[in-house]
Image (cartoon, rainbow, N blue to C red):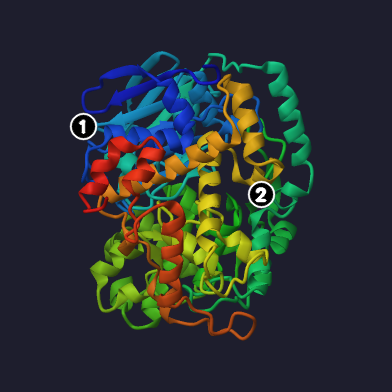
Amino acid sequence: MLAYTGRILHINLSTGKVETEPLKEEWAKEYIGGIGLGIRLLMKYSKPDTDPFSPDNPLIFVTGPLTGTMGPTAGNGYAVVSKSPSTGGVAESKAHGFFGPELKRAGYDAVIFTGKSEKLVYAWIDDDSVHLLDAQQLQGKSPYETDEAIREELGDHYIRVSAIGEAGEKLVRFAAIINDEFRAIGRTGMGAVMGSKNLKAVAVRGTKDVNVADLEGFKEFIKMIHEHMKGPATRKYRTLGTPENVLVLNALAALPTRNFTQATFEGAEKVSGEYLNERYVKKIIGCATCAMRCDHIAVVPEGPYKGSMSRMEFECLWALGPNCGVDRLDAIIEAMRLCNYYGIDGISAGVTVGFGMDLYKNGILSKENTGEMDLNFGNHEALIETIKKIGTRDGWLGNVLAEGTKRAAEKIGKGAEKYANHIKGLELPGYDIRGLKTAALGFAVSFRGACHLRSGAYSPDVKGKVNRFIIEKGRGKIIMENEDQYNVIDSLILCKFSRGTYYDGLDDMANYYTLATGIKVTAEDLRKAGERINNLARLFNIREGVGTREFDTLPHKIMTVPIPDEGPAKGAVVNKEEFELGLDDYYAVRGWTRNGVPTVEKLNELGLGEFAEITKKKGEK
């Protein structure tokens, strides 16, 4: 079993005990690696109804079978899996850069952290040598400052570090884990899980080889992928980057504005990818092994935020910009810099601030709540100040918004839940799904909550492959097939920006896997693995009480407030009847009951029969 290390490392932060276990070869084939293996380990090592901040909640760092190889994008990734403090269900996120390959070269397919340290520590993994070192001197430092300090302390600039900031330490529910300055394990709040364990960082140095089964065949394959990366499939990422989406979605009236009040933004040109690259982008860089180069690093040249620097992607630009009514890129770059500094997810941060602005506009929050701050849409100074409050849990406003929109709305009351744009507790990304209805259904059934990256369900809507203003029979199949393929991508830990370079889809991915590992798999094997992973994640959510039909829903605004903008989407809204039809269609093609629970027959078909008891407890057969 080449490419894998064959070892899983366990670190108990309460006792300091360190041990390893072998990776089962059948798990390698059935769950691949990345999020698939991570969710399987989460199911094995977590107990039902464990609080996400309990010492018993495992925090699992996972590499993929291609991590540490010369394979483009797949060679540089890692994933983190846990139970989410935002949703109460599966938490998973991926990041690329240089940390993942170093962890693999240290000799581990996964590292599982359990327990809670009595004081703030960081884990130092130096091949087979594993230590927990005092990190109290790092308290309150940003992830990047932590990275620099640890490298200096250990005396090796080439050590790679994944760390949390002050937000993680203070259990902000959408806190992130960040490596390589800008690369984030961003969504679902795993930085807060890490903080709950008093684990400030994971530092790694690896010196072991990662060998592949067929080196010559592997090299020929990745040469082909490198060539594809120079072509049209990655043009957007190599040129304007994902901020190109701003004007595309604005033209479709699908750019959520002012907390989903409108679907077009009058200031779109000022925050577009074109304007960003012309005025602010100073450098475009790439990750280890990647020929694409997609990291657009923006620097503010003048004004009150002069010198502010951050990587800019569409989702965070949208959340901190149009969603908050802010049309100043200098302020958006500064807001994103602060998200990186405190270690918080830029999407959830922007949506949560926009939620607060909406409440202020509608009289649910007042200056008494905001500390005399004018929390108006478009107020860039209020945006900056509110992020600082969230990142440090400063005052009433910072504390309540640090809980995310779902819990904040529950705490605030007064009808605040009508303005909270989340699914399962995870804030919506930058697509107005009132007029992108395949996406609306796909976001609703996603096992990690509102997520554009679990199925890419927005793509057929945006590209005009379907009528985006209706939900009809057949949408469930589109979503299922995309979900299963994305599960494979995220278990191989391929960068989704490169997905178009695999011209033969799962056939290419199966070849990639086989050349690396020596384990012969087919496209159908991978498709089945993707389906297995999705069903296992659903089972985990069901076990934790957040995985049935009642949780596959949409925010109040999406289902009751039509798009007001003049243009192609005017009047669009997702009505209950069509949405319920869509859920029925999706559950049917999944082989689930009308309550959204996998049947015992489906579990047996996927080799998940050992978990049938979870469905039986729900009264399902």
* Nearer-N-terminus badge (2/1): 1
Q: Residue at x 32, y 23 (%)?
A: 10
317 and 63: which one is in front?
63
Disc 1 element: loop
**Residue 357, located in which quarter of the rendered image?**
bottom left
Whether label 2 touches label 1, CB < 8 Å: no
Residue 254 spot, x, y in % from top left: 59, 71
Q: Residue at x 40, y 56 (%)?
A: 449
**Residue 270, located in which quarter of the rendered image?**
bottom right
Disc 1 packing (10 Å; few <14; some 14–19; many ≥20) = few
Q: Which residue is mark 2?
A: 296
Q: Which residue is mark 1?
A: 118
Q: Specify whether residue 84 is in view.
A: no
Give the answer, above or below, for where 336 lies relative to 53.
Answer: below
Disc 2 element: strand
Residue 44 spot, x, y in % from top left: 29, 32
Tell me which amino acid carries mark 1: Glu
